[in-house]
Amino acid sequence: MKILVAIDSIKNFESSIEIGNIFKEEFTENVDIMPFLDGGEGTVEAMKTLIDGSYKYVNVHNPKNEVITARYVMKDKYAVMEMAESSGLRLLYKEDLDVMNSSSLGVGEMIVDGLNEGADSIFIGIGDTATNDLGMGMLYALGARFYDSDDNELNPIAANMARVSYIDIENIDYRLNTKPITIATSSDNTLFGDNSFLESRIYRKGATDEDIAFLYKGSKNFKEVVEKTLGIDSIDLPSLGAGGGVAWALYTFFKAKISRSMDVIMERVDFGDLIKGYDVLILGEDVDQFDGTSSIAVSTYAKSYNEDLKIFFLEDRDGKEIGQREIFDEIYKYHISDDFDRREMIEAIRMLAKDVNQNLIGH
């Protein structure tokens, strides 16, 4: 029996490659590992393995404007970044989340560093972010400046979007106009349409109902001023709300390509041909985050190339159930405590791998 393991996360353990290696160690069958991306935490580690790149380290500002060290991956002038490294929820304690005073400045600083290091193309995973500023901070790092009606320069935080009267883009880093940019996300969030980025997920960033009302007004104003500055028509599509609107800013200013996170992986590994050589595919991700859309897409694609393939999905018993359950051959429910530290979590994942192995042998 030949098994392919592609697990994004188990509980709050986000390292796809490390999870895969644990399963490989505990399985008695022949196991290979495929990185799994949702665009959030773990993107850099997964892509580093896939492209065999090297880490680059840069000092950036986190959502609270504190200096931290973030990392990205470079290989042959191809830069792979993860917004969660600079602007992620994991960088702050829950009580420190403050979406109104947060900024995406750090991801812009990473991009500038990548350009300075000679990057010819840039890949950015967008997810698990603590910011909601439509990329105002990122654009500031790239050289844009924002002013109110009295010509006062504004700090690039979400609370100031409502005050923006005009934007100076004379010194914006237009090197990005000649560098292909790919945004990887599993989010379908629009800005103000159905599934808006101001709906349920923004509460994870510490927003109150009052904050959301203010952010709606501010985001509308900021979007209109940007469109007037660039001389473009209004646009709002699925996924443009990803990363608190950073996807919209990159798409609007620099014509970034928006891609499903796992599409990037499947293209690089030639998944259609690869999956023909396997008997079993094991998938798993946090359904609460993106509704399991990546696992559903991978499963559907896999079955179209290997109709005899058996697909197992690992589902957290405490979380949301994945949809389109009929496309999986088995849903394997598990329970792991949210309170485990890293050592306890690794041991729990090891026990889960042993259980799944026994389950497969039983089949």
Image: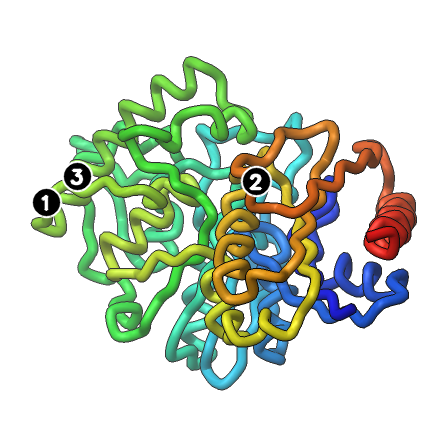
**Mark before the other along the chain sequence, 3 or 2:** 3
Colour style of the rendered protein structure: rainbow
User: Which label sits in the foreground, 2 or 1?
Assistant: 2
In the image, is 110 to the left or to the right of 338? left
Looking at the rendered structure, which numbered label has been put on residue 42? none
Query: Can you identify the residue that label 1 sits on?
Result: 233
Is 174 above or below relative to 246?
A: below
Three-letter amino acid code of the residue under disc 1: Asp
Q: Where residue 296 appears, x then y in whole percent?
A: 53, 47
Report the mark closest to the observer, 3 or 2.
2
Q: Percent x, y for residue 353?
A: 85, 53
Picture quarter containing residue 336?
top right
Q: Earlier in the sequence, mark 2 or mark 1?
A: 1
Q: Which residue is mark 3?
A: 225
Say whether residue 77 is left or right of residue 190: right
User: Measuring 19% from the left and 46% from the top, which residue is drawn there?
Assistant: 167
Identify the secondary structure beneath mark 1. Answer: loop
State the image coordinates of residue 288 (x, y, percent, origin top left): 59, 33
Q: Is residue 17 above or below residue 332?
A: below
Kind of residue sitting beneath label 3: Val
Q: Which numbered disc, 3 or 1, marks the residue that appears first in the sequence?
A: 3
The residue depicted at 42 percent of the width and 25 percent of the height is: 199
Residue 169 in the image: x percent, y percent?
20, 55
Vertical placement of residue 310 versus 130, above or below: below
**As drawn, is 190 to the left or to the right of 271?**
left
Residue projecting furthest to the top: 210
For marks 2 and 1, give the CA distance: 42 Å
Give the labeled residue for mark 2.
326
Please name the residue shown 68% across and 34% down the image.
Answer: 93
Amino acid bearing label 2: Glu
Q: Observer-nearest residue: 88 or 189?
A: 189
